[in-house]
Amino acid sequence: MTREYLKTATLTPSSGASDVHDIVQGILSDIEQGGDAKALEYAAKFDKYDGSVLLSDDEIQAAIALVPEKIKRDIDFSHDNVRRFAEAQKATLRDIEIEVVPGLIAGQKTIPVDAAGCYVPGGRYSHIASAIMTVTTAKVAGCKHIVACSPPRPGVGVAPAIIYAAHVCGADKIMAMGGVQGVAAMTFGLFGLPKANILVGPGNQFVAEAKRILFGRVGIDMFAGPTDSLILADKTADPMVVAVDLVGQAEHGYNSPVWLVTDDRPLAEEVMRIVPSLIDDLPDTNRDNAAAAWRDYAEVILCSDRKEMAATSDEYAPEHLTVQAQDLDWWLERLACYGSLFLGEETTVAFGDKASGTNHVLPTSRAATYTGGLSVHKYMKIVTWQRATRDGAKPIALATARISRLEGMEGHARSADIRLAKYFPGENFDLTAEE
């Protein structure tokens, strides 16, 4: 390849990262042993909040009353889009059965997990959309019990708009508890909750590490790192639109990489000229995050042609991938590694993050090479079953006995032998692995 890096990252998302594993493991162990009381102790320390942990119906309604009607309509609009997309996704899964050989029928059945724990960040930003994305998909999947857990703010509690979103999207319980202690409470079934079968939703490095440690005893949506975004742009792209989109994603956090990949040098140079002024125009906290992300983690890569651009994108496997270039169908067909794809200037990552219907809980840190994002499918178990007639079992039993003996698994072989002897008495079968 003939890539030229017009801007190179000086850091990676893992640069300088503290080892939080021991801290998180200690908190999880304390809470598992100490139960509700220990979880409340950590909540008092980290959340600095002493209100209700599980919100009552009256508290939910009081919070909902604080949400402006205009915002409610926007949340309802987003929820409807996410719900309809999730329903379409669910329709792609169906129960099946097939007669594998005459007399032996095997099938597939889809079963939703019973209890889902949905973590909704509420620290630096109130992630209203995360409540919509996680709770709605769990509800469509058919989970019987859904908990929405969000960190309360001192003296305020969970943001009212998050409470409204979680409620309208179908949460059975809303928990005012953040961080590791919130994740632990859902996992261990504290405060009278059912133990979660799956934990979903974004969070800070402590939440992500808690999910990583707990994976196995519960399911999780994915291992998550800092959010990242890549834009593929050719000479037809609008430099201002490209720059605004890059800055919009950089504001997620100081270590959120944004990448521009193009085959047009003038476009790249103009975007690099514009970005600093756009960052300077952001509010204080957003500006600090975006400035650090652009300075330390952003890259601008010049390629020779669109094939090299596509190959570069697949290598980076971004969480969010935007194409602002000609021949969108070519890109849709060619690109293979991304969490969610945004084709054309008329859509943008922010649309997917908030309201367009596709889910915004997506694979980061190159995980898009092997997985997609959160969907209704994540809450579904695809299980198999089989049944057979005696005649249908015969060829399966013969093959099973011989393969098992070849593997040295005599007990397995005898499970087949006993059926052949019972169903077909007097018949002689070759049950050895030798010729």
Image: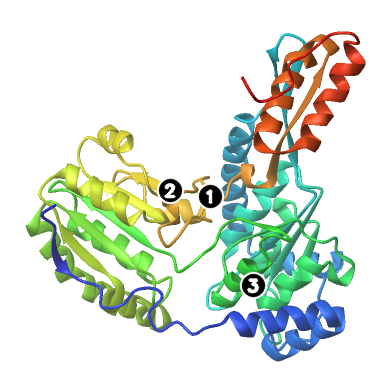
Q: Helix, strand or loop at disc 3?
A: helix
- Cα–Cα span, label 3 and label 2: 25 Å
State the residue position of label 2.
Answer: 340
Can residue 191 be seen in this snapshot? yes
Three-letter code, disc 3: Ala
Number of numbered discs: 3
Of the pair 241 and 191, the residue shown nearer to us: 191
State the residue position of label 1.
Answer: 359
Q: Looking at the image, is mark 3 or mark 2 earlier in the sequence?
A: 3
Q: Position of residue 149 (x, y in %)?
A: 71, 67
Tell me what residue is drawn at x 21 percent, y 50 percent. Answer: 233
- Cα–Cα span, label 1 and label 3: 22 Å
Q: Looking at the image, is mark 2 or mark 1 earlier in the sequence?
A: 2
Tell me what residue is drawn at x 65 percent, y 72 percent. Answer: 159
Q: Position of residue 417 (x, y in %)?
A: 83, 24
Which of the numbered marks, if any, corresponds to residue 183?
none
Q: Position of residue 321 (x, y in %)?
A: 35, 51
Of the pair 267 and 156, the residue shown nearer to us: 267
Compared to residue 129, the image places residue 280 above or below, namely below
Q: Helix, strand or loop at disc 2?
A: strand
- Cα–Cα span, label 2 and label 1: 8 Å
Can residue 178 be seen in this snapshot? no
Asked if the residues shown at circle 2 and circle 1 are in contact, with their CB atoms under 8 angstroms apart, the answer is: yes
Side of 366 where 408 appears, left or right: right
Q: Helix, strand or loop at disc 1?
A: loop
Q: Position of residue 343 (x, y in %)?
A: 33, 42
Circle nearer the viewer, 1 or 3: 3
Tell me what residue is drawn at x 31 percent, y 49 percent. Answer: 314
State the residue position of label 3.
Answer: 210
Three-letter code, disc 1: Asn
Compared to residue 294, the image places residue 130 above or below, namely above
Side of 332 where 415 appears, left or right: right
